[in-house]
Structure formats: structure tokens, C-alpha cells
Amino acid sequence: MTNQLKVSMYKWRRFWVLYVAYVILGAVGITYGYLKLSPAEGAYEGFLATISDTSFVFIITMVTAGFVGSDFSNRTIQHEITTGHSRLSVILVRALPVFLSAISMHVLYIVSTMIGIWIKSGTMGQHFTGQDILWLVTVLMQVAAVQSIIQWIAFLCRNAVVGIAASILFTFMTCNVLRNFMESRIFTISVFCFVRESSYETLIPALMIAIVVIFGMLFLTYQTFRKAELR
């Protein structure tokens, strides 16, 4: 499994779609911070404006589905199975780069927006607190949780193009459409609605739900893939 993980991480570092996504999110963040947000509160306002923003989760989703799905399309996963690797290891060695790419993309979007405001205002504004750090950790776990669902979709479809299309549609419906229409307490602490405020009463249950979703989806992915016929 160690060698599998090394190969998976190597492919992740060479996955050109990821770097295209980095450029897009970085450019969007700087532009948004510089042109759209008020410099009154300094760069900290960029953090507040983007930490809970799910507008560009579909880009993260596209990277995840493309990364996992390409290994089915080029028969890398089929080769791993025939050479004796377990199906569980096939899933786990792809989960780490999937989570890392998702987290890094959302962080880049936040930071680039803060940079855009800082260029205009020249000030940081309000300083970060321990509660802000917990807020960020919670949202990043929610980001990873959403991508654990996307990984399951990719293993279910076992085709890069179909997986990307299904994943983007799923993300658009949950993280964009439903987020705009559902205000119930249950939905606002779900992984599809990144927590919008930093109270402990919201952060703690949202964090717990995100962790449960991650492990639950890894288990469901294994159960889905365990007896799947590979062609």
C-alpha cells in the first residue's frame, strides 16, 4: 500500500487539471477581493466573505472526479487489482490526494481573496482568533466530506467523463441550488452548506457531521466497489 500511495501522490502532483484549477481560483479570488469587496475591514473581510462560499465547489469536484475517473479510463485501477492490491487500498490511496487537493483549493480561494483586498487597503484589519481557526478547520472538513461523496460517485460510475458530469450535477444541486433555498438547522450544519458563522453551537455539530460523512462515505465506497465487475 505504501508504494501505491507513492504512485498516487506522484500522479496527483503531475495532474495538470489541478494546476489549472489553482490558477482559476487564485485569479477569481484576487479579482473578487480587489474589485468587489470593501476595504473597510481590511483583508480579514476576504476571509469572512469566502470561507463559507460554495460557488466554486464544482471546480473542486471536477478535479476529484477527473483524478479518480482517469484511473479507471486508463485502466490503472484494473491493473492494481490484477497485481494483487486490495480494493480497500485502491480507495484509500486516492482519498488522501483527493482531500489534499480539495482543501488546498478552498484555502487558495480564501487567501487569494484576502490578498486582493490587502492590495487595495494595505491592512489586515481584524486579527484571527482561535474561534476563526476552528471555523476554518470545520469548513475544510466539510470540503473534504463533500469530496468523499464525489469519490464514491467516481467509483460508482467508473468512467472519467460520466463521473465528472454526474459529480458536477450533484454538487450544483446540493451546494448551490439547495443552499439558496433551504434554511433549516439540519441543512445549515450539513456538509453541503459550509458553516456561515463561528459560534461553537454551530461549529461542533457541523464538524462532527463532516467527520461521520467522510468515514461513512469511505465505507460506502468500499462496499460499492468491493464486488464491482471491472472491465
Image (cartoon, rainbow, N blue to C red):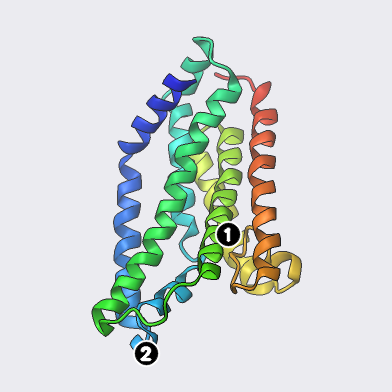
**In the image, residue 225 above or below residue 157:** above
**In the image, residue 122 above or below residue 58:** below
Residue at image mark 2: 40
The answer to whether any part of residue 166 appears in the image is yes
Q: CA distance from mark 1 to mark 2?
A: 27 Å
Q: Secondary structure at mark 2?
A: helix
Q: Tag 1: residue type? A: Thr
Residue depicted at x 35% and y 46%: 18
Quarter of the C terminus within the rendering? top right
Across and down, in percent, residue 13 comes to 32, 37
Q: How many marks?
A: 2
Q: Secondary structure at mark 1?
A: helix
Across and down, in percent, residue 145 comes to 59, 49
Residue at image mark 1: 138
Pick whichever, 138 or 93, lies toward us: 138
Residue depicted at x 44% and y 27%: 5
Across and down, in percent, residue 165 comes to 51, 47
Across and down, in percent, residue 6 comes to 39, 26
Side (left or right) of 65 relative to 152: left
**In the image, residue 7 above or below residue 157:** above
| Residue ranking furthest to the bottom | 40
Tags 1 and 2 touching, CB below 8 Å = no
**In the image, residue 224 above or below residue 119:** above
Side (left or right) of 177 relative to 74: right
| Residue ranking furthest to the front | 130
Residue depicted at x 37% and y 36%: 12
Label 1 Cα crowd, 10 Å radius (few <14 / some 14-19 / many 20+): many
Side (left or right) of 121 relative to 210: left
